[in-house]
Amino acid sequence: MSSHRQETDGRTPGPHEADRRETVDIDLGGRTVTVPRGGLYERYRMDTDLDEVARDPRVSGVEFFRRLPKTRVDSAIGPTLTPNFYYRISTARLTMPAPSRAIRARLPKELVPLEIAPGLGLVSVMFFRYDVCDIDFYTEAAVGIAVKPARHGGLGFFDLVTGLKNEHLDSYVLSLPVSTPIAQVRGHDGYGFPKWVTAVDVDIDARRTTARVANDTGGDDLTLSAATPAQTRHPSGARVTSLTSYTTIDDAWHSTLSQTHVLSAGTARFPRGLTLRAGQGRMADDLRSLKPLRPVRFDVVTEGQLALHMPVPTSVQSRSQ
């Protein structure tokens, strides 16, 4: 096990910056990745002490996680504990209609877009900031497509109404860049997501939401700037949303469940004054290929928590394009 030290510019580092000043190499499913020395992953390897997390001033509480016991499973990255716990997160999601024809051109033939009207589906651009979690601080972004649940042949409109009412939707992700090597290896090798490492800057507070994803040359891939929608506080345990994502691992279909414990959130419908710019890069290319129309919804969670379960094999019905 080796260590690395990173120099700072003399200013007082923030909580997650302090974690990243020194790193250590660890083995993850045969891959060597760096993690913060003394961080949660190095000390606990996914079996994090909830009492210690509860003492972190950034974390509102841990009762949500006490009701979700972890189990040990074998996976593509070796034996691990699931779910992966995220104790303080903030997220932004911009939802846009897009032509079903463009969406179908990017979907595997086994999946069907969730339509809000004949010939019109939904796509999203998402940004995530994970301040405290089992694999330490990181950020990520995504371009995703809303799809019908696997093996479900119902009408899209009723799927949509049911999904929104129960706050559960299904998706297929085209792009998922992340800011740390451990997030990339776990996400790509362990979950089957299209993850790569790049600079992903995400800042979300009650006033403003900004994000930037860098491309291979350091320029802009995708950027977002918007006023944060007015936030509503939710009592602990009162609002839990879920998302099922479909991926393939070794050519076999899997589904991954994520549960978000929402503590403070807000929504703007047909948002104004929002700037989303597609530059040059993998995310921009994926978004352009979907031919999105005007945004219809902007959801921001300024404080939440997340439980990300390991993927499980799932039966996906074979369909023609």
Image (spheres, helix red, strand yellow):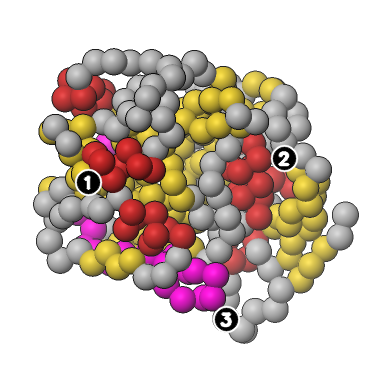
* Residue 106 image point, x, y percent: 38, 43
* Residue 147 image point, x, y percent: 33, 31
Q: Which residue is mark 2?
A: 44
The residue located at (57%, 76%) in the rendering is 12
* Amino acid type, callout 1: Ala
Q: Residues within 10 Å of mark 3 (few under 14, many from 20)?
A: few
Q: Secondary structure at mark 1?
A: strand
Q: Which residue is mark 3?
A: 11
The residue located at (51%, 33%) in the rendering is 247
Q: Residues within 10 Å of mark 1 (few under 14, many from 20)?
A: many
The residue located at (57%, 81%) in the rendering is 11
Q: Which residue is mark 1?
A: 98
How many marks on residues?
A: 3
* Residue 1 image point, x, y percent: 88, 54
Q: Nearer the viewer, mark 1 or mark 2?
A: 1
Dividing the image into 4 quarters, which one contains the C terminus? top left
Magenta stretch?
Answer: 211-235
Using the rendered view, name the quadrant where residue 8 is placed: bottom right
Q: Secondary structure at mark 2?
A: helix
Which of pointers 1 and 3 lies earlier in the amino acid sequence?
A: 3
**Viewer-proximal residue, 318 or 163?**
318
Which of pointers 1 and 2 lies earlier in the amino acid sequence?
A: 2
Question: Horizontally, is 110 left or right of 115 in the view?
Answer: right
* Amino acid type, callout 2: Tyr
Question: Horizontally, is 307 left or right of 26 in the view?
Answer: left
* Amino acid type, callout 3: Arg
Image: 227 above or below 250: below
